[in-house]
Image: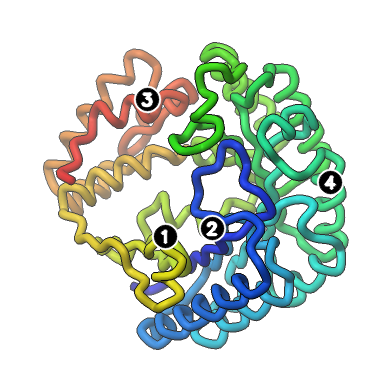
């Protein structure tokens, strides 16, 4: 392990969105936040002692809504990270941020504390669509937060948007993208809405006025073309960036590099070891953190490398994989090759990558060719 990425989970939010199945709790008290941050700080210290000599080059605060916490608490947590880990001077340090949870002074505090990247959850710039999603902010709130972040000194801003939202049209999604691009974010993530079990959307799934499959596909394809015209290179199925602004932390996941997750429900990947923390708050606060642990077999490691690598625009270098995994890598290369004639994959210098059509149906293709043991 030469470098390491850190993920810190903040499981609080002002209210739960109708589509959200993440581990988060709305409306928690100051006492609950204080207890959680104390436990998280202890976990940071514990792992910092175990990881001496390892350089951290990305730190990511996710949630929930990290900015539900007051900025001084986030600053204190980041200070604990830099105290107990060896963090590179040019490390990418991100926090997710929901509009209407921060103001200019708060953003200045975060920037001064060392956060140098914000991932702001827009989801839509249609107020009607935002209300249907259960978001607490308006389009105007997003724009105000974005502009305040620039004034606070953030020169690396990302925005998340969704397509496939109830009552959304191809035109309304295009309008959201136009308004976002006019603000000139450095990075954009565009995700298709997924109806997850246990959410209000799942309970109402039979009556939700969702766009049909053809419209949703059009939204994605139109977004890819439009964002390319505006200078955003797609580097992963759902992620687009200006030059030099790819998410270094998220690339760790797709490239199977080491990352350590801390906080409730956080997951870790260290070599071929996988472990995840409990989702039980009382158990976590008591210091009983690890819920699951597994060693990934060589076969499943190969499947992971193909599955994650094919999410990237550059695809998978099967020549390099063969050097590590041998003939088994060539078998998966052959399985992908059959999709070339249908226009779903394209040949690269040393392997294969998805086309836009292939990226849109990537889950189905990968489910067909991969055979995980576990």
Q: Which is nearer the eye, 22 or 233? A: 22
Measured Cα–Cα span from mark 3 to mark 2: 25 Å
Q: Secondary structure at mark 2?
A: helix
Image depth: mark 4 or mark 1 in front: 1
User: Which residue is label 3 attached to?
Assistant: 345
Q: Residue at x 55, y 60 (%)?
A: 11
- Rendering quarter of residue 209: top right
Which of discs 3 and 1 lies nearer the camera? The answer is: 1
- For the residues labelled 1 and 2, say whether their Cβ atoms are less than 8 Å apart: no
In 3D space, how far apart are the residues under numbered discs 1 and 2 (Cα atoms)? 27 Å
* Disc nearest the viewer among 3 and 2: 2
Residue 245 versus residue 20 in the image, above or below: below
Earlier sequence position, callout 2 versus callout 4:
4
What residue does disc 2 label?
Answer: 248
In the rendered image, the vertical position of residue 178 relative to residue 206, given as above or below: below
Instruction: From the top left corner, tell me how far across and down residue 215 is, in percent.
Output: 59, 14
- Residues at circles 3 and 4 in contact by the CB criterion of under 8 Å: no
Residue 205 image position (x, y, % from top left)? 51, 23
Question: Mark 4 vs mark 1: which is more N-terminal?
Answer: 4
Distance from disc 3 to disc 1, alpha carbons, whole Å, reads 38 Å
Instruction: Identify the mark nearer the N-term, 3 or 2.
Output: 2
The label on residue 141 is: 4
């Amino acid at each position: 392990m030469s470098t390491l990425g850190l993920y810190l989970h903040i499981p609080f939010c002002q209210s739960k969105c109708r589509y959200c199945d993440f581990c988060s709790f709305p409306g928690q008290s100051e006492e609950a936040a204080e207890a959680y941050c104390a436990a998280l700080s202890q976990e940071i210290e514990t792992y910092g002692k175990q990881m001496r000599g390892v350089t951290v080059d990305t730190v990511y605060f996710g949630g929930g809504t990290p900015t539900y916490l007051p900025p001084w608490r986030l600053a204190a947590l980041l200070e604990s990270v830099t105290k107990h880990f060896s963090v590179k001077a040019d490390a990418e340090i991100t926090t997710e941020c929901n509009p209407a949870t921060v103001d200019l002074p708060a953003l200045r505090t975060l920037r001064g504390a060392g956060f140098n990247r914000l991932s702001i959850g827009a989801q839509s710039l249609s107020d009607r669509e935002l209300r249907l999603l259960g978001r607490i902010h308006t389009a105007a709130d997003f724009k105000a937060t974005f502009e305040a972040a620039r004034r606070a000194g953030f020169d690396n801003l990302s925005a998340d948007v969704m397509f496939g939202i109830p009552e959304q049209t191809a035109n309304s999604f295009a309008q959201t993208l136009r308004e976002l691009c006019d603000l000139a974010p450095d990075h954009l993530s565009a995700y298709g809405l997924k109806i997850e079990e246990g959410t209000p959307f799942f309970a109402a799934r039979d009556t939700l006025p969702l766009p049909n499959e053809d419209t949703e596909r059009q939204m994605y394809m139109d977004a890819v073309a439009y964002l390319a015209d505006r200078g955003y290179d797609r580097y992963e199925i759902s992620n687009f960036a200006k030059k030099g602004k790819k998410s270094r932390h998220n690339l760790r996941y797709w490239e199977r590099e080491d990352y350590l997750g801390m906080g409730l429900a956080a997951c870790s990947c260290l070599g071929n070891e996988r472990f995840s923390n409990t989702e039980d708050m009382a158990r976590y606060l008591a210091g009983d953190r690890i819920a699951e642990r597994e060693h990934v077999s060589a076969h499943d490691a190969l499947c992971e490398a193909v599955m994650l690598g094919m999410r990237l625009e550059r695809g998978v270098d099967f020549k390099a994989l063969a050097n590590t995994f041998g003939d088994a890598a060539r078998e998966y290369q052959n399985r992908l090759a059959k999709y070339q004639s249908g226009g779903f994959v394209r040949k690269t210098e040393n392997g294969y990558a998805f086309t836009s059509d292939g990226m849109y149906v990537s889950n189905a293709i990968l489910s067909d060719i991969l055979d995980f043991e576990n």
